[in-house]
Image (spheres, helix red, strand yellow):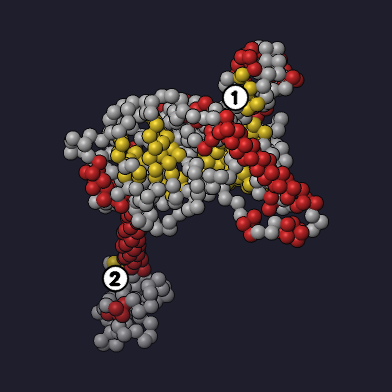
Amino acid sequence: MFTSKGALAALALAASVSAAAVSDAAAAAATIEKLRLAPVSADRINILNTDDQFVFDFFSPNTPASKGAGGRIITANAATFPAVVGQGSAMAVGILDPCSMNTPHTHPRATEIQISVNTTYRTGMIAENGARFVTNRLSPGQMTVFPQGSIHFEFNDGCSPAMFVAAFNSEDPGVMSIAQRFLGLPPDVVAATLGDLGVEEVVGIEKHIPDNVAVATDECLKRCGLHRPEQPTTQRQPKVPGNTAGSESGSGSNDGKKQGGGYDSGKKQGDNDGKKSGGYGSNDGKKGGDNNGGYNNNGGHGAGKTHTIQVGANGLTFTPSNITADIGDVVIFEFHPKNHTVTQSSFAEPCKPLAQTSANGVAGFKSGFVPVAPNATAPFPTFNITIKDLEPIWGYCGQQGPPVHCTEGMVFSINSKEDTPKTFAAFQALAKKGKVASSAAPSASGYAKVAAALASDSDDNSNGGSSKPSPALIALIAINGTLLIGLIAMSVLYIRKRRAAARVSRHRQLYTSIGANGEEIFVAPEKPEGSRRSSPSGVPRSVRAAPQENEEDEVRHGLTHGPYYDPHEAKGYHDRE
């Protein structure tokens, strides 16, 4: 029974935790103030008196991040990484889930240079009034620039997660989300700006602005076989007397409890009190998914049970590897160190993505690689799916290693029919036999198949940091090498044939003459002195080629400059006969 004494103890604990957080924040602020007041750079180095203060971990679950239903943005700036104070630089890493978008925003104090890391996504920018709209598709290794103050966005319209890295020329670049800030102006001002849309309509729209990173278009979701989750709306502009409609009067609608945005008399619901609907955000460490691929997340919505499968927590395994789930249940894949994927496959091809084997075009789900630091602690990144039917679901880890995780038995099943030959044990046995996506040697038409596999399967394209090439890449290189050698051989034969034909043509033109009686005769060329090919009688070949009845008669060969030796022939050519 929870006694008053226990309640007092709990309150005391909460107060101590809160005081510790305030103390930490105050200490961080004091450190930053010292860094800003330091007269020389050497003093700033000495203020940060431990080496680890110069390291920022973008992938640590404890690193602050801006999160939405579609991913997260982690920024190393003066507030989160004091080592950049006075350096005029900052950096951010964005992780965009399939069909998600870093919504339109600006950086008021910095120009951004951005590079795509692992896949292709779409960008767009408007720099200012009068400037044209600029849009591009950034492939891995490509970079773009967003000038200071420009409105820009990143849209991952693919079916696998995307990651980008952004650098800024300010330690405090700032960010302003356009939708939240614009619709956070007084509703009548917004309504008039939009052509007198209506204050009530503006208020209704503002309530539903999703947090960044947001889930994107229905077209993309349908193409990738995904479902739109509920999205948190906690990043909206706080209401004050100056920017509220008449029905909101500073404390929010619905008796001061604004349902969609979590505002309750100016207090954001769900940031710290653990009551945020949908299981997004902090929620006392009980994440319904930080949406690292959790685009089917229904955790916390009251729709069925929740099942958790740990990925890599006990070596190269899914724990548990085989579960039973009902329609509407949510399966949460919890990623542990180091770098794994959750990829749907088929029973017949355990280590090949379902998108490559499905006869009816089913794409299947795929988390992409989710790196987790070796020393990471809970909460871990997650990837969620919702069970739609009771058909068996088969899947594997797409890490190519070495070793290849799938062929090591790192597979899982959901609702496998254990009373049939297609059991989980049989599925795992097939995986261990080495049915990897690109292990089969290509047939006559295999070149296109291998190329398509390399282009379409991110699990086979990337090994999450290993430098060992995949079997598909080796096969493709071998095929290209064979084709190149064959092409070179055919070119050599063709050139030799053309040279031989040209030689015959030159001989006919140069060595055809007119005899004494007007007939055409062939006049053999006279070799230069020193040639091994000489006349047995010592008579020049040109004379032997056209013998005369009377030795005193002039030899007529039709060439005004005498016996001819073809200068086009390589030296010693006739000597080879």
Task: For the C terminus, give its image quadrant.
Answer: bottom left
* Residue for point 31% across, 77% down: 574
Does 209 appear above or below 146? above
The quarter of the displayed image where residue 298 is located: top left
Q: Which mark is residue 86?
A: none
Within 10 Å of disc 1 (Cα), the crowding (few <14, some 14-19, many 20+) is many
Q: Is residue 57 left or right of residue 364?
A: right
Q: Position of residue 360 (x, y in %)?
A: 29, 31
Q: Which residue is mark 2?
A: 522
Instruction: Describe the element under mark 1 as helix, strand or loop.
Output: loop
Observer-nearest of 515 and 387: 387
Does 315 appear above or below 222? below
**What is the residue that sits farthest to the right in this orientation?**
39
Q: Position of residue 84 (x, y in %)?
A: 69, 51
Look at label 1 and name its amino acid: Gly
Q: Which residue is mark 1?
A: 262
The quarter of the displayed image where residue 195 is located: top right
Q: Position of residue 418 (x, y in %)?
A: 21, 36
Look at label 2 and name its amino acid: Phe
Within 10 Å of disc 2 (Cα), the crowding (few <14, some 14-19, many 20+) is some
Observer-nearest of 450 and 409: 409
Observer-nearest of 125 and 22: 22
Does residue 352 show up? no
Q: Is residue 218 left or right of residue 402?
A: right
Instruction: Describe the element under mark 2 as helix, strand or loop.
Output: strand
**From the viewer's perspective, is the residue at label 2 or at label 1 nearer?**
1
* Residue for point 76% across, 59% down: 43
Q: Position of residue 277 (x, y in %)?
A: 52, 26
Q: Are marks 2 and 1 in contact (CB under 8 Å)?
A: no
Does 243 appear above or below 447? above
Q: Is residue 185 left or right of residue 494?
A: right
Q: Is residue 285 left or right of residue 202?
A: left
